[in-house]
Image (cartoon, grey):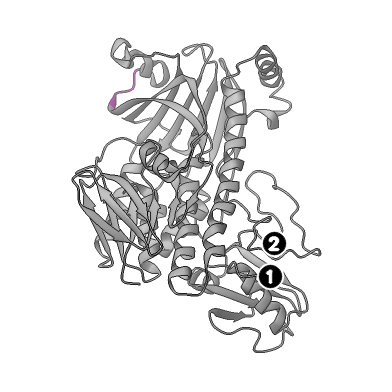
């Protein structure tokens, strides 16, 4: 285990991968092409609860503390409000927070700086990954090399050369319309608790505007703009004042993006695992890019660690592709449906959207402004042991969790369970289960919410339920553990 794991890219996904790999006791080298952190712009701002929980396991609870959680979502069509919904959440972590990617990276950097197992090398652009039977030789543009046992490729959506070198295609499409993003600071009473979405407002006719509150009296405004839009030729002050009125404001940052929908055809190439934007690109409505990238990092980290410890083999590493590629395709389907609603391309799509918006006051459920990121549930994974008495019932309503079933992420409400679940495999024993159901590498917990009498639940190191075992025996637990390690 002397050769490090190399993480290519020091964005939030790469940072998370490095922290999680180090938590599993592995040495890590992070190679980043930039010479220093670019602390500018909100970029990805919305982090979902289960991602906050992953960051909490590596000591970065501050992201949840500093982030802002709005409680009311308002949706408008032209000059009228269609509907709003509010929630009150009492979980141990908020359902999501808004916090700029810049600040998220700063907080993750602070944790990395405390960890002697992680080296970060700025100004090291990786140009080649050459594999052999024993590892990977990582070559940088300056001609230097690093020898790695495994590589997690988090180099972003523009890592075309590295993907080609691995024989990985990146099919998909780009949207013609662009989006102007402005970060402003202003005193807007009441707006800090609300997210506002406008379809076809008078001040951006035919297109959309989204306003998100962020900490410190700042707001992120996204305008859909036509192809070829040039902010230098636009009156940004007039555009912003159409929203905030005469209130004084400070423009902090602005940029223009064109959104892509792409998923790599392979997320594993030998000892190299693709994660984050290097593996998939989505339109941002629903915040599925960064959130799914962090889940990629967690999935990759525990599997590399178990392979490096000799507890699992190629089957576990190959399951990274099986699980995270399926997750990427689901996110692609959800975000593509949102974009078809936001940017209809055919007469049929335009007519459908018009009908839905006109009837939204009575039936708001069909209005699609983006479904917030959710965990992917590994129901069909080769690591999951099915249980006919606990079938997966499909995606629940927005904001709800499904009943426990094999493959579903376990809600970590019990403080003991939160401390233990991401340290390895965990067996939850219901009342009346026989003793000595499991040995290494499994931690056993009794008297926890969930399992019924005689039932045992096996949790993976990422807190997903690998198996629910009625009438559990040492043999059924051992079989489920072998399956969960990719060794059926």
> Which x, y percent locates residue 156?
38, 41
Residue carrying label 1: 450
In the image, taking residue 276 as reference, residue 414 lies left or right, namely right
| Residue 247: in magenta span | yes
Given contact means CB atoms under 8 Å apart, are the residues at marks 2 and 1 in contact? yes
Considering every residue shown, the one lying at the far right of the view is 389
In the image, taking residue 376 as reference, residue 453 lies left or right, namely right
For marks 2 and 1 on the same chain, the one whose residue lies earlier in the sequence? 2
Residue carrying label 2: 404
> Which x, y percent locates residue 404?
70, 62
Q: Quadrant of residue 109?
A: bottom left
The one of 77 and 33 positioned closer to us in this rendering: 33
Q: Secondary structure at mark 2?
A: loop
Q: Secondary structure at mark 1?
A: loop
Can I make out residue 384 in this image? Answer: yes
Label 1 environment density (alpha carbons within 10 Å; few <14, some 14–19, many ≥20): some
> Which x, y percent locates residue 206?
54, 12
Considering every residue shown, the one lying at the far front of the view is 132
The residue located at (66%, 63%) in the rendering is 384
> Which x, y percent locates residue 473?
73, 83
Label 2 environment density (alpha carbons within 10 Å; few <14, some 14–19, many ≥20): many
Question: Which residues are the magenta region?
Answer: 246-250
Q: From the viewer's perspective, is the residue at label 2 or at label 1 nearer?
A: 2
Q: Quadrant of residue 452?
A: bottom right
The residue located at (56%, 56%) in the rendering is 90
The residue located at (49%, 38%) in the rendering is 169
Asked if residue 376 is positioned above or below residue 20 in the image, the reply reads: above
């Amino acid at each position: 285990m002397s050769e490090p794991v190399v993480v290519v890219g020091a964005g939030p996904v790469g940072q998370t991968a490095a922290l999680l790999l180090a938590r599993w006791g592995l040495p890590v080298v992070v190679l980043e092409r930039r010479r220093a952190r670019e602390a500018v712009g909100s970029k990805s701002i919305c982090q979902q609860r289960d991602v906050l929980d992953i960051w909490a396991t590596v000591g970065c609870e501050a992201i949840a503390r500093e982030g802002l959680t709005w409680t009311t979502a308002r949706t408008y069509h032209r000059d009228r409000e269609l509907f709003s919904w509010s929630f009150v959440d009492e979980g141990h972590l908020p359902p999501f927070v808004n916090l700029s990617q810049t600040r998220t990276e700063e907080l993750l950097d602070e944790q990395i700086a405390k960890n002697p197992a992680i080296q970060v090398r700025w100004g090291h652009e990786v140009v080649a990954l050459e594999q052999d039977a024993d590892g990977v030789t990582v070559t940088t543009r300056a001609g230097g090399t690093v020898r790695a046992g495994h590589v997690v490729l988090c180099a972003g959506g523009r890592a075309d050369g590295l993907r080609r070198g691995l024989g990985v295609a990146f099919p998909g499409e780009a949207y013609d319309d662009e989006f102007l993003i402005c970060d402003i600071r202003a005193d807007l009473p009441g707006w800090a608790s609300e997210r506002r979405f406008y379809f076809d407002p008078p001040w951006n006719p035919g297109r959309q505007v989204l306003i998100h509150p962020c900490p410190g009296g700042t707001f992120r405004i996204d305008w859909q703009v036509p192809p070829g839009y040039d902010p230098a030729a636009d009156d940004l002050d007039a555009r912003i004042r159409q929203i905030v009125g005469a209130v004084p404001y400070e423009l902090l940052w602005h940029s223009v993006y064109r959104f892509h929908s792409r998923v790599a055809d392979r997320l594993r190439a030998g000892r190299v695992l693709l994660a984050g934007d290097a593996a998939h690109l989505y339109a941002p409505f629903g915040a599925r890019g960064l959130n799914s990238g962090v889940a990629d990092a967690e999935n990759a980290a525990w599997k590399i660690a178990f392979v490096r410890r000799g507890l699992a083999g190629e089957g576990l590493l190959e399951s990274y592709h099986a699980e995270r590629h399926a997750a990427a395709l689901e996110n692609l389907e959800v975000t593509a449906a949102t974009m078809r609603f936001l940017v209809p391309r055919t007469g049929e799509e335009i007519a459908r959207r018009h009908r839905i918006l006109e009837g939204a006051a009575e039936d708001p459920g069909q209005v699609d402004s983006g479904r917030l990121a959710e965990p992917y549930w590994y129901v069909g994974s080769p690591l999951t042991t099915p249980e006919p008495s606990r079938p997966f019932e499909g995606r629940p309503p927005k904001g709800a969790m499904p009943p426990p079933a094999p493959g579903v992420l376990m809600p970590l409400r019990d403080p003991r369970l939160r401390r233990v679940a991401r340290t390895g495999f965990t067996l939850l024993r219901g009342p009346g289960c026989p003793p000595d159901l499991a040995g290494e590498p499994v931690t056993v917990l009794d008297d926890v919410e969930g399992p019924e009498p005689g039932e045992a639940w096996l949790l993976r190191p990422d807190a997903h339920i690998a198996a629910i075992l009625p009438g559990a025996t040492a043999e059924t637990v051992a079989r489920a553990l072998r399956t969960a390690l990719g060794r059926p």
